[in-house]
């Protein structure tokens, strides 16, 4: 009996990490243009104009690869009554009191909500971003729409950045999680503890 | 223009005070539309002084030439034929260009430190070497003035000849105007001058003559004497009560600091959760298996 279970294939991992890397680059370059406190980040991208030039292209790459990922994981992220039950006990989850939590499939409610937040906000970021994309697309839109797009873009970016902060922290906090995306496998104990329904499905136990 | 580097009142994307030890009197350009004959000498003078040459365009059936402001045309005469009174045609010719707002929306919206500055004398100037070409100034401007160059992706607009004003000269358009429709001086003097013109126009039957110095943007350093100050829209859609879009204010004033704080707090919350609740481990089950 192997002590590890395959959670992500190599293709899924590559897909995830392309989205992750482009997200970090898009977030850093976007923050640079968002508040003067972050303007120094333009130095990572070769200065202000380069940051402005690169940011939208990075965003488009992120969008394309995220769409592939969304299709891959769509079905696994449907919210079920058990998820609502799990959500109600979020305090116990946060305080590491995991006994008696409802059984979780491949994803828990928190992971599913993050998925849906990304499914909504990434297309919003793309559409609002196109409206303000200088010099290629912005000249085709009226100024009032650009004003709206700037605010919508910032708001959607803020929501997704907060979501990813939680996502990254959760991966660090829940021991044994990171290897799911770096090696593709998780320990049986991890699977049994955090995703029992998925564990039973995978092992037949 | 570095010439006035010590006379700065406000600087884009800068959260600490700008160097402001040296103070100067606020200046203003006054454009008396009732005196303008539409000769476009001001457009020529602007091109001459600033070394600008726009592309030769096509005739669109009006006297407007070029048809719009561009990175090469920082001022454009806009011609409108109106009948305020039935049967009495009026040709209202407005010299369009940057209004040099006391509360400049472009500067507020700009994310690049020092790309837009406001001098102590009120001139709002773009420093193109710091411009990153994002176009946010377009969203900030209530008058639709800045233009992004197709050649270098930098924003351009009227400088109110800040280089000339810095050395005690009047702007090029003022210098050249053959009818005296454009005058330049301290803002106080210009308001005083305008009062005389308005009184004169009222005497001549323009009951609604007045000064255009919109308070929604804190007043402007380019002002108009209008024959019909009650209807500025007659003058090629000069906005009646311009102000910076509340969306820009919402975004720069509230959203930016609050959202930045939110992201910082989220990171701290994670850190403190870790040092209090600790990691979620599953060692016990591992042994049991």
Image (cartoon, coloured by chain):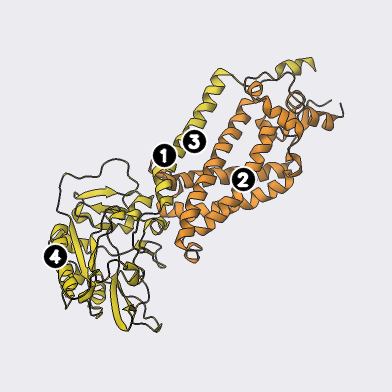
Chain colours: A orange, B yellow
**Of callouts 3 and 4, which one flags the residue occurring earlier in the amino acid sequence?**
4
x and y percent of residue A10 in the render? 72, 42
**Which image quarter is the N terminus of chain B in?**
bottom left
Badge 3 density bin: few <14, some 14–19, many ≥20, Cα 10 Å: some
Closer to viewer: mark 3 or mark 4: 4
Q: Are marks 1 and 4 on the same chain?
A: yes
The residue where tag 2 is placed is: A19
State which quarter of the image contains the C terminus of chain B. top right
Q: Is residue B120 left or right of residue A181?
A: left
Instruction: Mark 3 and mark 4 in contact? Answer it, CB < 8 Å.
Output: no
From mark 4 to mark 2, how far is it between C-alphas? 63 Å
Residue linked to disc 4: B193
**Residue occupying the far right of the picture:** A204
In the rendering, at what x and y percent does residue A40 appear?
A: 39, 43
Give the Cα separation between the discs numbered 1 and 4. Answer: 43 Å
Q: Which residue is mark 3?
A: B263
Numbered disc 2: secondary structure: helix
Q: Chain letter of disc 1?
A: B
Q: CA distance from mark 3 to mark 2?
A: 20 Å
Q: Look at the image and tell me whether residue B180 can be seen.
A: yes
Asked if marks 3 and 2 touch (Cβ < 8 Å), the reply is no
Badge number at residue B257? 1
Q: In the figure, is residue B1 to the left or right of B59?
A: left
């Amino acid at each position: 009996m192997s002590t590890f279970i395959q959670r992500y294939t190599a293709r899924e991992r590559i897909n995830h990490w392309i989205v992750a890397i482009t997200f970090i680059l898009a977030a850093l370059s976007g923050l640079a243009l968002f508040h003067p406190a972050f303007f120094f980040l333009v130095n990572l991208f070769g200065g202000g104009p380069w940051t402005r030039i690169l940011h939208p292209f990075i965003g488009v790459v992120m969008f394309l690869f995220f769409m592939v990922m969304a299709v891959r994981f769509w079905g696994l992220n449907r919210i079920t009554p058990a998820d609502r039950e799990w959500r109600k006990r979020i305090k116990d989850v946060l305080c590491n009191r995991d006994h008696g939590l409802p059984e979780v499939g491949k994803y828990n409610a928190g992971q599913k909500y993050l998925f849906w937040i990304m499914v909504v906000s990434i297309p919003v970021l793309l559409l609002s971003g196109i409206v303000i994309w200088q010099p290629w697309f912005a000249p085709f839109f009226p100024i009032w729409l650009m004003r709206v797009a700037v605010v919508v873009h910032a708001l959607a970016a803020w929501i997704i950045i907060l979501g990813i902060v939680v996502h990254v922290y959760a991966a660090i906090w829940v021991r044994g999680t990171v290897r799911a995306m770096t090696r593709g496998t998780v320990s049986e104990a991890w699977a049994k503890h955090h995703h029992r329904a998925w564990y039973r499905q995978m092992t037949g136990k | 223009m570095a010439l006035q580097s010590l006379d700065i009142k406000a600087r884009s994307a800068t959260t600490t005070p700008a160097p402001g030890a040296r103070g100067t009197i606020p200046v203003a350009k006054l454009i008396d539309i009732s005196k303008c004959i539409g000769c476009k000498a001001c457009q020529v003078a602007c091109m001459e002084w600033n070394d600008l040459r726009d592309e030769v365009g096509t005739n669109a059936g009006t006297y407007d030439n070029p048809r719009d402001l561009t990175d090469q045309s920082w001022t454009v005469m806009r011609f409108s034929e109106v009948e305020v009174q039935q049967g009495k045609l009026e040709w209202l010719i407005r010299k369009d260009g940057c209004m040099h707002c006391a509360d400049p929306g472009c500067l507020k919206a700009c994310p690049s430190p020092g790309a837009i500055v406001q001098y102590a004398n009120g001139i709002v100037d773009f420093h193109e070497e710091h411009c990153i070409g994002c176009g946010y100034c377009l969203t900030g401007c209530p008058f639709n003035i800045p233009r992004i160059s197709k050649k270098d992706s930098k924003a351009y607009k009227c400088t109110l000849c800040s280089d000339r004003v810095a050395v005690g000269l009047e702007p090029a358009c003022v210098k050249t105007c053959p009818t005296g429709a454009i005058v330049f001086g301290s803002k106080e003097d210009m308001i005083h001058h305008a009062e005389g013109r308005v009184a004169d126009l009222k005497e001549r039957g323009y009951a609604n003559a007045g000064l255009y110095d919109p308070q929604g943007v804190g007043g402007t350093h380019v002002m108009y004497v209008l024959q019909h100050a009650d209807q500025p829209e007659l003058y090629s859609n000069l906005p009646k009560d311009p102000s910076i879009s509340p969306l820009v204010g919402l975004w720069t004033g509230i959203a930016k600091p609050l959202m930045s704080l939110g992201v910082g707090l989220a990171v701290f919350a994670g850190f403190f959760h870790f040092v209090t609740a600790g990691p979620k481990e599953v060692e016990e089950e591992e042994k049991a298996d």
